[in-house]
Amino acid sequence: MHNFEYYAPTKVVFGRNTESETGKLIKELNCQKVLVHYGGGSVVRSGLLDRVYGALDAEGIPYISLGGVVPNPRLSKVREGISLARQEGVDFILAVGGGSVIDSAKAIGYGMANEGDVWDFYARKRTASACLPIGAVLTIAAAGSEMSNSSVITNEAGWIKRGYSSNYCRCRFAVLNPELTCTLPDYQTQSGCVDIMMHTLERYLNHGTNMEMTDGISEALLRTVIKSARTLRDDPENYEARAEVMWASSLSHNGLTGCGTDGGDFASHQLEHELSGMFDVIHGAGLAAIWGSWARYVYRARPDRFASLAVKVLMIPEKSSAEETALAGIEAMEDFYRSIGMPTSLRELGIEPTKEQILELAEKCSFGNTRTIGIVKKLGREDMAEIYRMAIG
Amino acid sequence: MHNFEYYAPTKVVFGRNTESETGKLIKELNCQKVLVHYGGGSVVRSGLLDRVYGALDAEGIPYISLGGVVPNPRLSKVREGISLARQEGVDFILAVGGGSVIDSAKAIGYGMANEGDVWDFYARKRTASACLPIGAVLTIAAAGSEMSNSSVITNEAGWIKRGYSSNYCRCRFAVLNPELTCTLPDYQTQSGCVDIMMHTLERYLNHGTNMEMTDGISEALLRTVIKSARTLRDDPENYEARAEVMWASSLSHNGLTGCGTDGGDFASHQLEHELSGMFDVIHGAGLAAIWGSWARYVYRARPDRFASLAVKVLMIPEKSSAEETALAGIEAMEDFYRSIGMPTSLRELGIEPTKEQILELAEKCSFGNTRTIGIVKKLGREDMAEIYRMAIG
């Protein structure tokens, strides 16, 4: 068991109609002017944005708005937000949307609270020393950004997708109303379920010895999301299942499922970041498409952990060796992904990278062959290329 | 599933030697003068207090000290702390100890940050509007006060033990080094394990429908503590088991195991508060002594929840009815308590209240017959007296 730090200070306000509390939550923080940040038209059409404005009006909180955040949120929008927020004297950013909108809000927050170019943080040139306070009204359960310390932005110059993590950007509050996710397209709901599971899987499949407490929480979370994803496939408006998934989204990426472990692998995430940077696919679907190939490439390094996943989460009876159990678990996970309409190969994801594109993906993912990724098994540029090749399907 | 709020902002720094980070953690909070608050001589003898002072000295942080907190911490010590801290211009309280020391620190914090008599909050005459910032270096895994919003104080005038809860008193940080608990007497270790389990049981055994995510976390926590308590009975210095128990202590009472439920029963806690107020017994042992009688008195109101506990935590095969399974679970829990040297009756706890004392306990616990306690089954004064009687053994 490793020493660890756990810090998840976000106040969660969970349940039906909780968006009506947004104004009060901001008022408690003594903020003067809010930038309401959002994505496409769905929050407008659903009336959510109007309800949020109403909650701000009720507390007499002035605000301006900036919409247009797209999935795999863009640096150009972040720069637009920083410029607007500076000009308007904004001191709080309210993200109304999913992980992309929250990540964009975090990046704007970094840009507002630090000198110089905000991309420097994502390019790992320097570290931030502050972030404007952020709050979130969540509309998609997936990225876990509402409680996490991370933010991922895509720089259109080169379509480079990079994450930056620090405690400064943790949301002050997260309003989680599961009802808001009931009308999502199935593909997005299920991509979200994959993303949630992957945040825990990345931490569960590691190289160290874990805490049993953490393993138990992780296994409960994975079982709950699998069960709820199946329920939502057949009954998309099931409130209880929506709620389980939404709460799992926050718990999966707020640090809880990593306590005492050796830090989380995150190779699948990094491999997928390059895919969605280049092809603009939905993150969760991209993860489902790449995970099986990654797992087959690395499982022999820790067959016991993969076997635990098989037995305790996927309910596979133990085979004659940990390797066999592990492999049966990987197959069962892919079967599950397919059963909820998720791809398990790049072809099923709708992309077919050329040989040159695979080399480019691996080149980018290895930062020009200067870094390895992963903990279960350290992966260099050639390993990455091989996993992308295996994943074509 | 119920709407809920979850807020656990305490920064946890967990693992070996983490007390050396105490100075840095306070420095980050820009505090000027610290009151180091502690209990008896064990933190002096073990050298822990000197190591903490060293960590403060290393950051140039001025401090004063106040020791002498006893289990079931007293209002007189709280008043002494408030007076000393005011006189010395203290703006941060560092609790070095277990739940009693942290609770005493919280009460001093309330007294410092609010006008008037601090007992008013515990007597429910008014609510606090602030609390001085608190940090904790934990030496006993039990009460969960290091991450909870609660504090329990005993007023020697009438030996009345009362709790007060608010988010203001949540610790800014909690230093959790499992090594510090390795030398605890067995009885205290196991009382701690009971207290930890009870914080989750109080929330798990309720009247509503739960979240599966919350149930899964609670069951994992209970199984982990049961297993670790058995390990520590045979091998008290087992670091891994100490760590599991210490982390479970914080998670069990920070709100996580109550998310989406109807709020937690807490009748056993309230019944025990009167016992330890009157007889000064160790809280966890008192809980073990009263729980079985409470459970037998109320389980028919929600046999399904008690049956879940039996099957998923205590590994009892299902019987022909939920009632039978529930009852077998209650017996198994008592067997477990006895197996780790914990009492399951007041006699085993070493007290034998007279008829008059039982009426007095019930009178106090019902606030003079003006309140009921419990959610699984609402309990009035006569119910309380009956449970105390059943518990004599």
Image: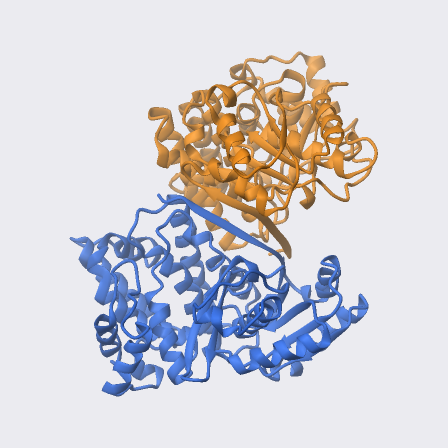
Chain colours: A blue, B orange
Q: Is residue A345 visible?
A: no
Residue B342 percent across, percent down from the top left: 47, 22
Residue B282 percent across, percent down from the top left: 56, 22
Q: Which residue is drawn at 74% across and 57% down?
A: A28
Using residue B378 as the reference point, say whether residue A99 is left or right of it.
left
Q: Residue at x 44, y 34 (%)?
A: B328
Residue A374 percent across, percent down from the top left: 30, 62
Using residue A4 as the reference point, say whether residue A242 is left or right of it.
right
Q: For residue B377, which quarter of the picture?
A: top right
Q: Is residue A302 visible?
A: yes
Q: Is residue A236 above or below residue A266?
A: below
Q: Front-most of B284 and B245?
A: B245
Q: Front-most of A187 and A155?
A: A155
Using residue A270 as the reference point, say whether residue B191 is left or right of it.
right
Quarter of the C terminus of chain B within the rendering: top right
Q: Residue at x 76, y 69 (%)?
A: A56
Quarter of the N terminus of chain B within the rendering: bottom right
Q: For residue B202, which quarter of the picture?
A: top right
Q: How many marks?
A: 0
